[in-house]
């Protein structure tokens, strides 16, 4: 399966609301998922949404064991989430740094809810739900935002905490290619 090009901020597909998946378990859906996995791994992403590779469908994948882009992040189980729904379980918001494969070479401080429940379907159409907190909750919100045409800079409240990795973190090697 090929590694796909990741669309960058400004591309029209990244500004659209993605369409729901209606047919599960198809060869096309499985091939898309494999391309997404390969692309996420090749780019050291914590997650990837289908619109980021030019496919306007409500599919995200995410998962972190050890990731050079997020060396201090707690593990997040690998998840395929189709047609997701999010329910915030707290009003508590935490600000932290985020990056995005569609905004390469940059980071910004983004407020996100600290606890949520997400539900949706796996690639075969089996429904599931899970509660997430901390970094896991942040990743889910970030990836699901892509399905509504939102990139993290649109969530930022202080643009003075947005910039290029090498300027913000001159002593760290942060890979965003």
Image: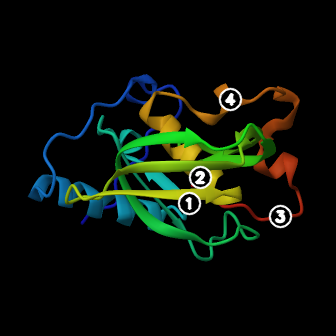
As measured in the structure, the alpha-carbon distance from the residue carrying label 4 to the one carrying label 3 is: 25 Å
Residue 158, placed above or below residue 164: above
In front: 14, or 177? 14
As measured in the structure, the alpha-carbon distance from the residue carrying label 1 to the one carrying label 2 is: 7 Å
Residue that label 3 marks: 172
Residue that label 1 marks: 46
Pinpoint residue 107: horizontal percent, then vertical percent: 73, 44
Q: From the viewer's perspective, is the residue at label 3 or at label 1 nearer? A: 1
Q: From the viewer's perspective, is the residue at label 3 or at label 2 nearer? A: 2
Inspect this view and state whether residue 101 appears. no
Mark 4 or mark 3, which has the lower sequence index? 4
Do residues under tags 2 and 4 come within 8 Å of each other at their CB atoms? no
Do residues under tags 4 and 1 come within 8 Å of each other at their CB atoms? no
Q: Mark 2: which secondary structure?
A: helix
**Residue 46 placement, left or right of 68:** left
Q: How many marks?
A: 4
Mark 3 or mark 2, which has the lower sequence index? 2
As measured in the structure, the alpha-carbon distance from the residue carrying label 3 to the one carrying label 1 is: 18 Å
Inspect this view and state whether residue 164 appears. yes
Pinpoint residue 156: horizontal percent, then vertical percent: 74, 30
Do residues under tags 4 and 3 come within 8 Å of each other at their CB atoms? no
Residue that label 2 marks: 139
Q: Mark 1: which secondary structure?
A: loop
């Amino acid at each position: 399966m090929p590694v796909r090009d990741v669309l960058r901020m400004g591309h029209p597909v990244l500004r659209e609301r993605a369409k729901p998946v209606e047919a599960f378990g198809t060869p096309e859906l499985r091939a898309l998922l494999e391309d997404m996995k390969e692309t996420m791994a090749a780019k050291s992403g914590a997650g990837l949404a289908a619109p980021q590779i030019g496919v306007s469908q409500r599919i995200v994948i995410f998962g972190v064991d050890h990731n050079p882009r997020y060396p201090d992040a707690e593990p997040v189980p690998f998840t395929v989430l189709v047609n997701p729904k999010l329910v915030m379980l707290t009003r508590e918001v935490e600000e932290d740094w985020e990056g995005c494969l569609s905004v390469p070479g940059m980071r910004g401080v983004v407020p996100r809810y600290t606890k949520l429940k997400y539900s949706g379907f796996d690639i075969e159409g089996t429904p599931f739900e899970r509660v997430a907190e901390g970094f896991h909750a942040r990743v889910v919100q970030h990836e699901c935002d892509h399905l509504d045409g939102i990139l993290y800079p649109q969530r930022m409240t202080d643009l003075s905490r947005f910039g290029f990795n090498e300027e913000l973190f001159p002593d760290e090697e942060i890979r965003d290619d």
